[in-house]
Amino acid sequence: QKEVEQDPGPLSVPEGAIVSLNCTYSNSAFQYFMWYRQYSRKGPELLMYTYSSGNKEDGRFTAQVDKSSKYISLFIRDSQPSDSATYLCAMSGVGANNLFFGTGTRLTVIP
Amino acid sequence: DSGVTQTPKHLITATGQRVTLRCSPRSGDLSVYWYQQSLDQGLQFLIQYYNGEERAKGNILERFSAQQFPDLHSELNLSSLELGDSALYFCASSVAASGSSYEQYFGPGTRLTVT
């Protein structure tokens, strides 16, 4: 079993829709939870990070962490064609040196 | 633009050969991380260097090695290349050795094709 599981999609939504992206994990030591966006043929770009449980909002993006269920989510409101990319969740433990990534979900927002 | 640079962008080579990938971290960042991204495995952590010293090892093959130089740039050496080594190789950097290693900034990657 992989430490981080993510549905690879692909996911297609119409412009303006609310998008929900999710990851589950098995390692209870994970405390930092990140979402990266990766455009085709580019490097991953850090979107948001959250420490421990709770919600964090940044513009149209909201990250949620439920440590009791070992489940994290990223919501995108009013999705735009420019949001079309692969979204990667990543996790890390306190004092850890590396990130554990999900395989990524490919999102397409249709104009 | 993350501020992390990687060269070359593309590399095509034959099985059995050796290649070197280069990375320059963001200004002020002391940690460099190397990752391999393949279609079936996703992003896999290979190795981390902090201020010239190896800090952590992940799923790095013995045929692969890395180092970080005094000017903080890093090189990843891949030898005895096999077809399965074809992948995107990313470098990332962060300020700290650990603790805040979650805030990593990725370069544009080097696409390696082994024929």
Image (tube, coloured by chain):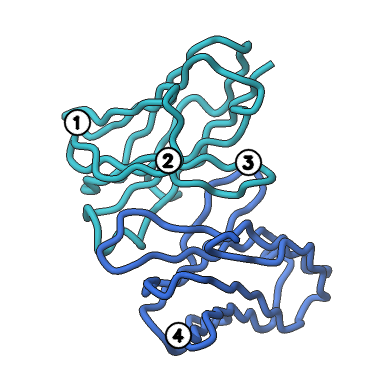
Chain colours: A blue, B cyan
Nearer to us: label 1 or label 2: 2
Q: Residues within 10 Å of mark 4 (few under 14, many from 20)?
A: some
Q: Indicate the amino acid at tag 1.
A: Asp
Q: Indicate the amino acid at tag 2.
A: Leu
- Residue with the mark numbered 2: B46
Question: How far is the residue under mark 4 from the one under mark 2?
Answer: 30 Å
Q: Secondary structure at mark 2?
A: strand
Q: Chain of mark 2?
A: B
Task: Specify whether disc 1 shares its chain with disc 2.
Answer: yes
Q: Which quadrant of the structure image shows residue A29?
A: bottom left
**Point 58% across, 36% down: residue:** B88
Question: How far is the residue under mark 1 from the one under mark 2?
Answer: 21 Å
Task: Specify whether disc 4 shares its chain with disc 2.
Answer: no
- Residue with the mark numbered 1: B71
Nearer to us: label 1 or label 3: 3
> Residue A88, image x and y in percent?
58, 61
Q: Chain of mark 4?
A: A
Q: Secondary structure at mark 1?
A: loop
Q: Indicate the amino acid at tag 4.
A: Lys
**Point 19% across, 37% down: residue:** B53
Q: Are marks 1 and 3 in contact (CB under 8 Å)?
A: no
> Residue A35, image x and y in percent?
51, 67
- Residue with the mark numbered 4: A56
- Residue with the mark numbered 3: B38
Question: How far is the residue under mark 1 from the one under mark 4?
Answer: 37 Å
Task: Specify whether disc 1 shares its chain with disc 4.
Answer: no
Q: Nearer the viewer, residue A64 or B62?
A: B62
**Point 33% across, 47% down: residue:** B93
Q: Is tag 1's residue or tag 3's residue first in the polypeptide sequence?
A: 3
- In this picture, residue A28 sits left or right of residue A64: left
Question: How far is the residue under mark 1 from the one under mark 3?
Answer: 30 Å
- In this picture, residue B5 sits left or right of residue B37: left
